Amino acid sequence: MGDILRVCALYPSRMNIYADRGNMILLERRCAARGIGFELSAAEHGDSIDPGAFDLFYIGGGQDRDQVQIAQDMLRTKRDALARAAEDGKVMLAVCGGYQLLGESYELADQVIEGLSIVSLKTVREPGPRLIGNVVIELEIEGKPQRLAGFENHGGRTYLGEGESPLGSVISGFGNNGSDHFEGVRHKNVFGTYLHGPLLPKNAWFADYLTALALARDGTPVELKPLDDVLEDAAHRCALDAGRRSRR
Ligand code: GLN
């Protein structure tokens, strides 16, 4: 088992709304509690990336304005490396605005933002309100049913291309577009989701799954030492309850 988790955060100074940087803090704390090293690097505007130098890539959410500002740079300086990392089975977690940029495009009223095209999906602005509120989704991980809870706030509606699988199905909330009951995407080890919260502190089990996958050397998630998760389990239950109460 690898004893260090090497994480690359993409544009953390811009793509970090709704406390999304808490996802990195949680990964770091859980690594520390298990005696696993943790290295966090930032790839900002103009920086190139060595896809082999990291186990996990992360991008948080952002306003449309932030997405416009990073998209071209991301295509120019990081696209090929990220595509290679995704093909090689590296773990990627992309939240909301970051998730939208994994796909081909994000269509706004007066412009189209070109995405990384790592995953086949498109995001469009359609008439209608922003999709806001608590979310609970159901998903299957390694053959086991699980739940993720979080909070969504997005104007874009995302539609998955043929052959892509959603991360989960919506139990409460809107998910990808408010109509097909899908939430997020999973493509190899690339995970896209609309769930803020931040996501990982509300779903520590998922942080562990990503860590176990990222540290895997042969594709099989490594076994992680169990931690005392009394508070983390309570936070998860609380987030699930919030989703249930606002069930639509
Ligand atoms: N700007 C995007 C939208 O409104 C993403 C927002 C977000 O990251 N919360 O759809």
Image: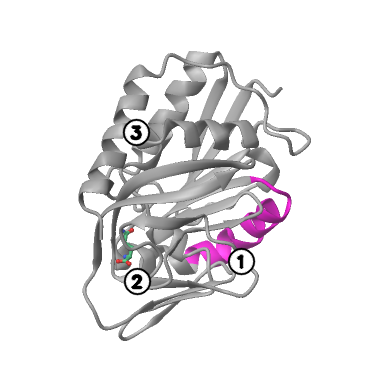
Q: Looking at the image, is mark 1 or mark 3 earlier in the sequence?
A: 1
Compare marks 2 and 3 and give the one earlier in the sequence.
Answer: 2
Chief secondary structure of the magenta portion:
helix
Specify whether residue 77 is painted magenta: yes
Q: Amino acid at mark 1?
A: Glu
**Residue placed under numbered mark 1 in the picture:** 164
CB at disc 2 and ligand 1 closer than 8 Å: yes
Residue furthest to the bottom in view is 110
Nearer the N terminus, badge 1 or badge 2?
2
* Kind of residue indicated by mark 2: Gly
Q: Crowding at label 3, few (<14), some or many (≥20) Cα neighbours within 10 Å?
A: many
Q: Is residue 133 left or right of residue 183?
A: left
The residue at the point 32 percent across, 52 percent down is: 135
Check disc 3 and give the amino acid type: His
In the image: residue 218, left or right of residue 245? right
Provide the residue designation for mark 2.
156
- According to the picture, the residue beneath numbered tag 3 turns out to be 236
Please tell me which residue is depicted at 35% across the width and 44% down the height of the picture. 149
Residues rendered magenta in the picture: 73-90
The 10 Å Cα crowd at callout 2, few under 14, some 14 to 19, many 20 or more, is many
CA separation in Å, label 1 and label 2: 18 Å
